[in-house]
Structures are given as C-alpha cells and as structure tokens.
Image (cartoon, rainbow, N blue to C red):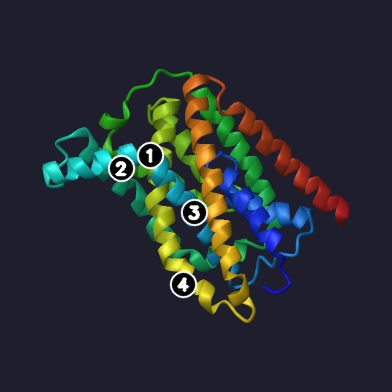
Amino acid sequence: MRATPAWVLLFMAVLQGFTELFPVSSLGHSVLVPALLHLRLDRAAPWFLPFLVVLHLGTATALLLYFWRDWLGILRSLLRTHGRPTEPETRLFWLLVLGTIPAGLLGLLLVHFVRSLFAGFTVAAIFLIVNGVALLVGDRLKKREARHRLDDMPWKSALVIGLAQATALIPGISRSGATLVTGLGRGLDYEAAARFSFLLSAPIIGAAGLLETPKLFHAGVGIGPLLPVVFAAGLLAGVCAWLSSWFLMHYFHRREVTALRPFALYCLAAGVGALALHAFAL
C-alpha cells in the first residue's frame, strides 16, 4: 500500500463513482484502466477488494440520498402494512429483497473466485465486449411495448433481475447494465428498469461494504497512514455516483429506443481497444 500514491486512490474513486451506475462495468474498469495507464496499484493485494468496497459504500450512500423519497415511502408503507404487500411501496420492498438474494448468496459463495479474477486483464476486456453486445440486445428489447409498471412487476421478474445482477461478479459485466437489460426483457420501460436497478444496488452494495470494510484495518503494513485518503475516496465516489444518478435518470426519461446504444458502442470499442493495446505491449 505504501507504493500506491494517494492521487491514484482518488482517481480510482472518480472512476468508480462514474462507472458504477453507467452500464459500462466499474469492476472491469478497475482492472483495465490501472493496467493500461501503468498506475502503481496492486490489484492482487489483500486490501484491494476492501478498498473497492469502501468506494461502493460511497456509491450506495449516494443512491440512498438520491432516492430518499422512494426509500422513505417504502419505510412508511412497511409500517402501515406491517410488512404485508398490500400497498405498492411494500410490494416494491419485497421485490427488492427477492432481487437481492441471488447476488448476495453467490457473492458469499464465490468471493475467492472473484478475487482470482481481478488479475485477469484479458478476461475483463472480453467480458466488456460481451457487456456491449448485451446492451445492444437491450435496445432491441425496448422496441417492444412495456408490459409492466414497477409496482405490478411479477415476483419472478424480480428474481430473474436479481440473478442478472449476480453476473456483475465477473469483471467487465456491468451490474446496472445486466439489470437494466433484464428489466427491459421482463417488460419494464427504461425509466422503470433504471429505477429498480438503482434501488436494487443499495442493499447489495451496503451489505458488501459492511462485510469487507473492516478488513482494511488488517490489510498489512502501511495501510494506517492512508486510511483518511481511503475514506475520502469513498466520499468522492459517492459525489460522482450522485451526479451519475441524476444524469442517467434524466437521460433514460428523455431517450427511448436507443438509450443504451452509446454505452454499448463504448464497451465494444473499449474492450477491443484494451485487447489491442495489451497485445501490442506484449
């Protein structure tokens, strides 16, 4: 950790904050960008995953603040109905719970496998291309008429979207992209799919943060002096994530049929470009 300059951590925070909610895979970028820029960042170090989770905590906090009206409405509805899904907000709460379970369970079971993937530059680039193809598919799905509102989405759809969220354990696959495309495939429109995707991210990111953040304090010699920078990076990631949320919710409201196409083309170009640069460097 001593070899990692503070500015690199802050740069990673900005990268995380803007790429977590954009459907371009923050995890894939955290693998590809440092390698391409030759940043002094040891992705195999035991502190790297907890550091990323601190950034995710900042992102989750930003999402809670941006969607505070939704969460407040859900809380009030839960109190009124005593947890029974008789109101749209309470039903939405249980849809979010159901959607969180697959990624939560798979994350716990596959955490060591995920750590091993962090060093896979080629894996991240290839799956970034796969992510781009999936986004193009999402644009085609949007051409079909929306069949469901967010408050009447079937329970099965929430589970399927949750399973899609779990694919973001692979670097290069975007969590928001996977859930957006799956939401479109299950009959939601862009705005509803984006809202459910962003609401769904808060519990899984928050739970991961609670699990992993304490490991920062046991991550090896030299971590102590940089702890303030690490948590400042989490705050910076949160600010960037709030700005991303604001932009994307307005963007998906304005753009319809081709809303995902620019992100798809970016992922395809970035994945192919990363592979080409990596091969040229070799």
Q: Amino acid at mark 1?
A: Phe
Q: CA distance from mark 1 to mark 2?
A: 6 Å
Q: Is residue 54 visible?
A: yes
Give neighbour class at mark 3: few <14, some 14-19, many 20+ (Cα, 10 Å): many
For image coordinates 81% across by 52% down, the residue present is 278
- Judged from the image, the secondary structure of the residue bearing numbered disc 3 is helix
Give neighbour class at mark 2: few <14, some 14-19, many 20+ (Cα, 10 Å): some
Q: Earlier in the sequence, mark 4 or mark 3?
A: 3
Q: Which mark is residue 67?
A: 1
Q: What residue is pinned by disc 2?
A: 71
- Judged from the image, the secondary structure of the residue bearing numbered disc 4 is helix
Q: CA distance from mark 2 to mark 3?
A: 17 Å
Q: Earlier in the sequence, mark 4 or mark 1?
A: 1
For image coordinates 62% across by 36% down, the residue present is 132
Image quadrant occupied by the N terminus: bottom right
Q: Are marks 1 and 2 in contact (CB under 8 Å)?
A: yes
Q: What residue is pinned by disc 4?
A: 214
Q: Which mark is residue 58?
A: 3
The relative height of residue 179 versus residue 169 in the rendered view (above or below) is above
Q: Position of residue 66 (x, y in %)?
A: 42, 40
Q: Earlier in the sequence, mark 3 or mark 1?
A: 3
- Judged from the image, the secondary structure of the residue bearing numbered disc 2 is helix
Give neighbour class at mark 4: few <14, some 14-19, many 20+ (Cα, 10 Å): few
Q: Quadrant of residue 45?
A: bottom right
